[in-house]
Amino acid sequence: MKKMSVIMVGLLLISILAVGCSKDKKVAEVKKSPFGLMPDGRAVSLFTLTNGDLVVKITNYGGTIVSIEMPDRHGKVDDIVVGYDNLKSFIRNSPYFGAIVGRYANRIANGKFWLDSVEYKLAINDKPNTLHGGKVGFDKVLWDAQEFKKDGIVGVQLNYISKDGEEGYPGNLSVKVIYSLNADNELKINYEATTDKKTVINLSNHTYFNLLDGGKSSILDHELMIDANSITPIDSLLIPTGKIKSVKGTAMDFTSYKKIGKEIEKKTEQLEFGKGYDHNFVISQPWGILRPIAKVRESKTGRVLELSSTEPGLQFYSGNFLDGSIIGKNKTKYNFRNAFVLEPQHFPDSPNQLGFPSVVLEPGRRYQSTSVYSFRVESRN
Ligand code: GLA
């Protein structure tokens, strides 16, 4: 009898301990909910990924990151992503908020390029150039979507078939993008594509961040580090000149942490052309393998974003076209430079620049690219 009660008490203790522990254990979940309808009636979904620390919302309209809720060093949670909370606004007017950009992220000069002695003419949407894929880029289409949960990792797989001739690009392109969130607060984006005809491709994500308050105030006090010793300088239409220019001694030098605002007002031709930073940085470490490329730190909250990618370049855009005309989530007015964008990518206008890494995809080959956005909090700066 005595032995029995000892065993019973033992079992009770074990179960109390187990409940206590499971409370602390981080649970990863993915949930699908309705997010409205496309103008043609197709249903759009919102996928909520959680890992116990972060809450990441992604819609299959444009493969868009809608929000990332993240605690600061005191545990106060903010949404650090700038944009909208409803589909209608994304459809009505979005400067690529959170979206997947393609078939060709960034600019193609005059919307034209040659491939195997054929000249392809693209939809012009940023006169006289093509920007982020054209008039209806990958940011404005509805992707097929399937959520998943595997080995403590949650995510959503997106698929889209871009037809031969869409926006002027050759080849039926089959694209797969996988967003996944792990227990280490890493949000990974895997891009893959195949084509049935020689084409060009450059995929990226266009999330606007503000680690302080999600876009209520300026990002100029955020500190940025980019592992790039050079940039591809631009002309007045933001098209690369084809040169590679060292950042040494210039406002473009982010090789160690520097406040974004420190030199942004310097009177230089490059900053004037970009109206601030809107430049492609040439990452120093060899591309094709996943390596750290940039870090951003916000000292008031302690929030840090670390970006790794397999891509050769990184477009750093300091939100220079935001002008207060867009009212986003929670009635937030997005003023000039209240958000920044870091777009891992191949260099802009590569189809017309022989000296840049090739963006040509041949039938039978597979385009592959990976970027990882890793979030953490520093207790003291
Ligand atoms: C990219 C471009 C910018 C701007 C934004 C969208 O980051 O480089 O010039 O067009 O997209 O507003």
Image: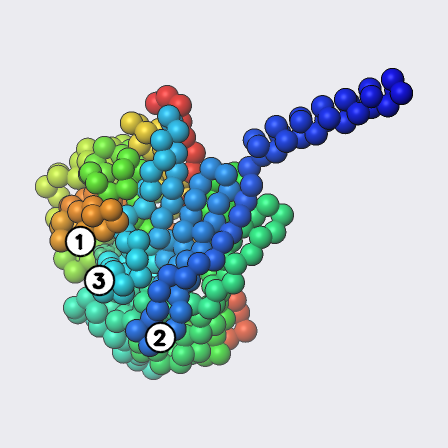
Q: Position of residue 164 (x, y in %)?
A: 40, 80
Q: Which mark is residue 326?
A: 1
Q: Say if residue 251 shows up in the picture.
A: no
Real-space Cα distance between discs 1 and 2?
26 Å
Residue at position x 28%, y 54% in the image: 84
Real-space Cα distance between discs 1 and 3?
9 Å
Residue at position x 37%, y 58% in the image: 64
Instruction: Name the N-terminal-most of marks 1 and 3.
Output: 3
What residue is disc 3 on?
A: 93
**Disc 1 vs disc 2: Cβ atoms closer than 8 Å?**
no
Against 313, is 158 above or below?
below
Residue at position x 47%, y 49% in the image: 49
Tag 3: Cα neighbours inside 10 Å, few (<14), some, or many (≥20)?
few
Task: Name the amino acid, label 1.
Answer: Ile
Q: Which mark is residue 41?
A: 2
Q: Position of residue 151 (x, y in %)?
A: 63, 48
Q: Position of residue 77 (x, y in %)?
A: 36, 35
Q: Decide if residue 374 is on the left or right side of residue 274.
A: right
Mark 1 vs mark 2: give the one in front.
Answer: 2
Mark 2 vs mark 3: give the one in front.
Answer: 2
